Image (spheres, helix red, strand yellow):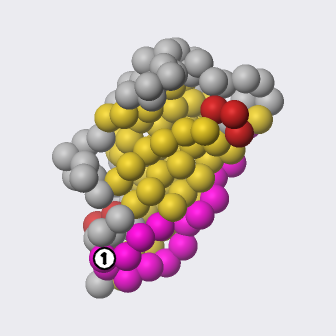
């Protein structure tokens, strides 16, 4: 069993930055892919970023956040981070950390077996 806990959410003005973290516990996850998703009120959960289980940690982003968000992981600490810069009001959502029991990440929420409880990010204009 894997337990994921996110932290780092909060409120920020447009143009500001936040750094989200996700700590995994329960079993080793170092070869598994991980990802971040978000869900705004009334909308479906959407893909934000993913990172593979490789040593290189190949990252993927949708166009909506590419160039502004950076995903990273510290396997020694079983931690994954999401650095979010140049935040926009449309980035407001609950952000979820997810883990996939596969080396390669996916971009659909159904690709991931384990989820954190979510952390709120609010960006004001």
Question: Relative to 42, is 117 on the left or the right?
Answer: right
Answer above or below: position of 15 versus 65.
below
The answer to whether 89 is drawn above or below residue 91 in the figure is below
Asked if residue 116 shows in the view, the reply is: no
- Give residue 50's quadrant in the image: top left
Q: Secondary structure at mark 1?
A: loop
Instruction: Identify the residue position indicated by label 1 in the image.
Output: 15
Quick one: quadrant of the C terminus?
bottom left
Q: Residue at x 56, y 21 (%)?
A: 32
**Residue density around tag 1, few if under 14, some if 14–19, many if 20 or more, within 10 Å:** some
Q: Nearer the viewer, residue 13 or 56?
A: 56
**Image position of 92 with respect to 20: above or below:** below
Q: Which residues are magenta?
A: 3-18
Q: Looking at the rendering, in which quadrant would you find the N terminus?
A: top right
Q: Give the residue at the far left of this rendering.
A: 63
Residue at the image point whose x is 31% and y is 79% from the top: 14
* 12 within the magenta span: yes
Give percent across and percent down for residue 102.
52, 15
Tell me the residue at 51%/61% (across/down): 19
Whether residue 114 can be seen here: yes
- Look at the image and say whether residue 73 sits in the magenta stretch: no
For image coordinates 33% across by 69% down, the residue present is 87
Report the label total: 1
Task: Judge from the rendering whether residue 35 lies leftward or rightward of residue 5; answer left or right.
Answer: left
- Outermost residue to the right: 26
Residue situated in front as seen by the camera: 108 or 43: 108
**Left or right placement of residue 93 versus residue 27 in this view:** left
Residue 103 picture location, percent across and down? 49, 15
Q: State whether the magenta stretch is mostly helix, strand or loop.
A: strand
């Amino acid at each position: 069993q894997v337990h994921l806990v996110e932290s780092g959410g909060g409120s920020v003005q447009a143009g500001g930055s936040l750094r989200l973290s996700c700590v995994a516990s329960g079993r080793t996850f170092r070869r598994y892919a991980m990802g971040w998703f978000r869900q705004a009120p009334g909308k479906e959960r959407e893909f934000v970023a993913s990172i593979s289980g490789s040593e290189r940690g190949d990252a993927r982003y949708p166009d909506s956040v590419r160039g502004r968000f950076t995903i990273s992981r510290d396997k020694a600490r079983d931690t994954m981070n999401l650095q979010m810069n140049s935040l926009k009001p449309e980035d407001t959502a609950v952000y979820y950390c997810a883990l996939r029991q596969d080396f390669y990440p996916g971009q659909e929420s159904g690709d991931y077996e384990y989820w954190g409880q979510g952390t709120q990010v609010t960006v004001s204009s």
